[in-house]
Amino acid sequence: MMNKKSFLQMEAPANYVAGLGRGATGFTTRSDIGPAREGPSEEAIKAVLAKRAQALGQEPTSTFSKEKKEGEDNDDNDNERYQDPENEVGLFAGGTYDEEDDEADRIYASVDAKMDKRRKIQREAREQNEREEYERQNPKIQQQFADLKRGLETVSDDDWANLPEVGDLTGRNRRAKQNQIKRFYAVPDSVLAGARDQGAMDTTVQEDNADGTMTNFASIGAAQKKVFGSRLDQVASSNDSAGGSTNVDPKGYLTSLNNSVIQSITEQEVGDIKRVRSLLDSVVKTNPKHAPGWIAAARVEEYGKRIVQARSVIAKGCEHCPTSEDVWLEAIRLNETHNSKIIAAQAVRNIPKSVRLWIEAARLESDPRAKKKVIRKGLDVIPQSVQLWKEAVNLEEDPNDAKILLARAVELIPMSIELWLALARLEGYQNAQAVLNKARKAVPTSYEIWLAAARLQEQEGKGDAVVSQVMKRAIKQLSDVSAMLKREEWIAQAEKCEEEGAILTCQAIIRETLGWELDEDDDRKKTWMEDAQNAIGRGRYETARAIYAYALRVFYTKKSIWRAAADLEKNHGTKEALWSLLEKATESCPNSEVLWMMLAKEKWQSKDVDGARKVLGMAFKQNPNNEDIWLAAVKLEAENKQFDAARSLLKTARNEAGTARVWIKSVSYERQLGDIDAALELVNEGLGIYPKIDKLWMMKGQIYQGENKLPQAREAYASGTKACPQSVPLWILASRLEEAAGVVIKARSIMDRARLAVPGHPQLWCESVRVERRAGNLQQAKTLMANALQQCPNSGLLWTELIMHLEGRSQRKSRMVEAIRKAENDPILIVTIARNFWAERKLDKAAAWFEKAIVADADQGDTWAWYWKYLMQHGTDMKRGDVLSKLTVTEPRHGEVWQTVAKAPQNATKTPEEILYMVVDKLEQ
């Protein structure tokens, strides 16, 4: 490669002439004398020029001749300059094809092949997609009916055989087309005006105008709508009557035709009836043994008010299909009572084993003795029919006769559980036991018999032990014969027993079957808790109580089960049962302060203060230094006006428990008693121990603010925000102090620092907006609100502030729609929507949205206050009483206005109902 010459240094090929392709000829200069080679001969040049002229369609001319033919154009032919480079006719006509040319061609061919192979997959995929897109947009006929052809696989041979013959529809189509053309003719105004005035009473005197009458186009338009509506009704009724199709389904006659006879039949319906009649006539002629065809033909005649023809058709059907039960029943239905009896007699002679025919024949009789006679004849023919035996027993008025019939029935049909249970219900206790024992032996897989035996023992008053023993034997025997129900099915049976009043049987079922098919590895506690909650949701409280009792025997020390059982007794039980349950709970879980406080609270609410004190004393022994029990004891003494005892308990609690919550309660109690100096002393002492507790700083600032000592309050809030920069209520109190002092600029500054300390908090943004709104800067408030919604788009508090205070009434609806999309489950926003419905006098919707807000978050006291305010104007006494009872149970603790009222020292002893009234009054302000 290093010795290879460059292109310009290489020797020229043999016979090479420079510029020969452009028409140049070889010549020899003085510098070429000596080693210069000879150029091509004149013959070779002439041959090349002839070949080029042939390719261009011209006569060959000599290169050396400059003469022009006569009449020839003087312009030179320059087409050679535009020759295709790949066309070698003119460009390389004089060249020779050597090995290098062959190698070049092979290299180019290999490159083209490689590039073609590289693009082949993409090209084929593109072509396949284009082909599929074209076929999808232009499907073939066979592709359009491919799914229908596949559906023909389900068509049976009988369906193919019963296809109706195609008649000549040429004339019919022509008439239909003519009717269609006539139908769309323009209706004259006189007809429309007549339709408008149809049924109207004219009480005016027509006044002749000199200039003629004028057409009232508005009235004519109303008449057109009326005519159009009547036409739509006719079309709908015709589609309903004929099914909207001329195809007949031989198996669908009984369901497609309506039994009721209409009062009037339109002309179009008459045509449909005729068409269906002809089709059904073809069906019964083609296959006279097809019973549904005869029934459908008779019902068509009945629909057309041709009852005589209908009876005649069904009579023919009875002749051709004497073994069809449906045909005989249809004939009985269409005829009068006397003829129906004769037909019923013929029917039972033809089909003596038909239970339905015997029952229908008995129904036609009006005399009870005749009914009994017919049923007993049927029993002679079909002694194994349970339905006939039941009909016979129902016809008996004397219980002894019914017992005799049932005794015979169980002898003939020993596998019928219904008959055994019916006989046991009619017998006394001893005989019922014997009947159930026989039934158990006859049908050992029946759980119903065992349940009946357990209920029999309960009705006799044998007690829980006997009922449980029966259920144990039942479970053992049913499991031996592999006839056990699933656990969920046993729970359903227990709920059924509870519904029917068999409480002991319900409890016995739960005790013996609740753990069925559950291993120790399974989450039995969760499963049983879900079962109990589902039973409570269905209103089956005894079943849920039994489930909790069983779960507590297995998980004796689980606090969650004890609390759930206590909630059930509290909401749906008695006080004595709740006390007993909580006493057992405290014995099993002595370290659970929640159960102790629940028991103490129930005692205290029942006015048993000494009992509550005793419970708390026992709780102290089991849980020393527990702050919840200390505070519960303090609350008990404070509620009973034992102030010194409460102070003493708090002092002891501060020394022994000494938690931040105890200090907070101590300061709060001194504020309630009005001892401000003691409260300040306690709060300062508490802050020395717990400087990071924001509630202590807030209480200190509120104490100074209540005493109108603004500098000290300002200092307390400032120190608090430095110690607890993440406390949102502390920032808000500091801002409101400055706002109350009239320094709006400082309040604004405090809120700006608060948003920097706690970014993205909706309460801080809302308070900033309110500061500007209360100062009258509405434009600045709107600007802040826009930024706030960008930071907190899902805050119902911000959307409420925007909708109720910054937007006009005309824009509220659109804003509410936008807010629902962003924060649809926010209870504050739901209350705002309810208030808007209330303002628009849409009372039902307002009530529904208030209840939805309570369901979303029952701990929001403001929601209860707004709902109560609504009920005071538009509610009933029953509804208000229901809301108060639920409020007492829920005891809400949160809410912007609710907390302001409930946390006030003077309202510490108020009940939730009293706080509700105070919050409602504050909402009105």
Image (tube, rainbow, N blue to C red):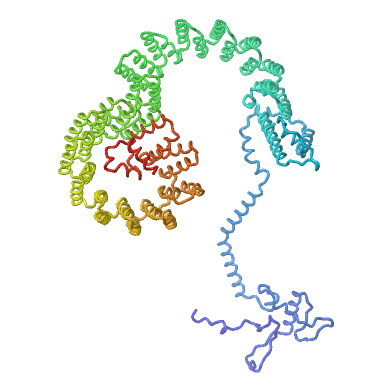
Q: Which of 294 and 914 is in front in this view?
A: 914
* Count of all numbered marks drawn on residues in the image: 0
- Side (left or right) of 797 relative to 615: right
Outermost residue to the right: 70
Quarter holding the C terminus?
Answer: top left
Residue 283 x %, y %: 70, 25
Q: Is the residue 174 above or below the residue 573 in the image?
A: below
The residue sitting at 27% across, 37% down in the picture is 909
Residue 321 vs residue 870, the one in the foreground: 870
Residue 377 placement, left or right of 834: right
Tell me residue 414's x, y (percent).
Answer: 45, 12
Asked whether, in this view, residue 917 is left or right of residue 119, the answer is: left
Q: In this view, does 49 lie above or below 565?
A: below
**Residue 686 position within the rendered picture, expressed as x and y whole percent measured from the top left:** 19, 49
* Residue beneath the point at 38% across and 10% down: 432
Q: Is residue 651 left or right of residue 530?
A: left
Foreground residue among 913 and 924: 924
Residue displayed at 45% across by 42% down: 835
Q: Can residue 662 be seen in this view?
A: no
Residue at the location (49% across, 7% down)?
396
Query: Is residue 717 visible to the viewer in this orientation of the structure?
Result: yes
> Depth check: 848 or 113 in front?
848
